[in-house]
Amino acid sequence: MSHQVLVRDLSTLAVSTLKALAKRNHRSLQGEIKSILEDTATRVKAMERFRRDTEKLRASFGNRKFSNSVDIIRKMRDA
C-alpha cells in the first residue's frame, strides 16, 4: 500500500543538500527522499529486532554474574 507524505518548511540547507545528494545518486529529489525514508525505516526495524533479541538473550542468563574479561586478558597477557 502506497502513501503520500507532505513535508513543509524544510530549510534551504536541507533542500539544497538533498538535491545535491539526489543528483549524485542519479535520482529525482522525490526519489532520493523516498530512498532515505525507506532505508531509515528498514534500519529502525532491524534495530528494534536486535534490541528485542538481545533482551531475550540477557533474560536467558537470569541473574548470573560473569567475570570481567578485561582482567582475565590482562592476566594472560602479563603472564
Image (tube, grey):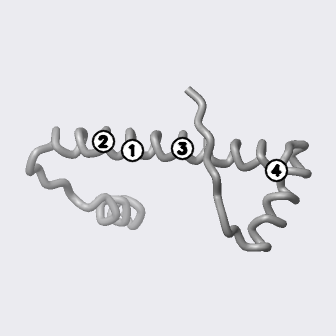
State the residue lying farthest toward the top: 1
Contact (Cβ within 8 Å) of mark 1 with mark 2? yes
The quarter of the picture where the C terminus appears is bottom left
Location of residue 76 by image quarter: bottom left
Task: Report crowding for label 2: few under 14, some 14 to 19, many 20 or more residues within 10 A (C-alpha).
Answer: few
Cα distance in 3D space between marks 1 and 2: 6 Å
Asked if residue 66 lies left or right of residue 34, the reply is: left
Location of residue 68 by image quarter: bottom left
* Residue 7 percent coordinates (x, y): 64, 58
* Residue 71 percent coordinates (x, y): 30, 65
Q: Nearer the viewer, mark 3 or mark 2?
A: 3
Asked if residue 22 lies left or right of residue 52, the reply is: right
| Tag of residue 52 | 2
Which residue is nearer to you in this view: 41 or 8? 8
Q: Which of marks 4 and 2 is in front?
A: 4
Question: Could you tell me which residue is drawn at 67 percent across and 69 percent down?
Answer: 9
* Residue 3 percent coordinates (x, y): 58, 36
N-terminal of the pair, mark 3 or mark 2, is 3
N-terminal of the pair, mark 3 or mark 4, is 4
User: Please, is residue 19 above or below residue 30 in the view?
Assistant: below
| Residue pointed to by mark 1 | 48
| Tag of residue 29 | 4
Task: Report crowding for label 1: few under 14, some 14 to 19, many 20 or more residues within 10 A (C-alpha).
Answer: few
Q: Nearer the viewer, mark 1 or mark 4?
A: 4
Cα distance in 3D space between marks 3 and 2: 17 Å
Amino acid tagged 2: Arg
User: Please, is residue 32 above or below residue 11 in the view?
Assistant: above
Where disc 1 sits, the SS reads helix
Question: Could you tell me which residue is drawn at 69 percent across and 68 percent down?
Answer: 10
Amino acid tagged 3: Ala
N-terminal of the pair, mark 1 or mark 4, is 4
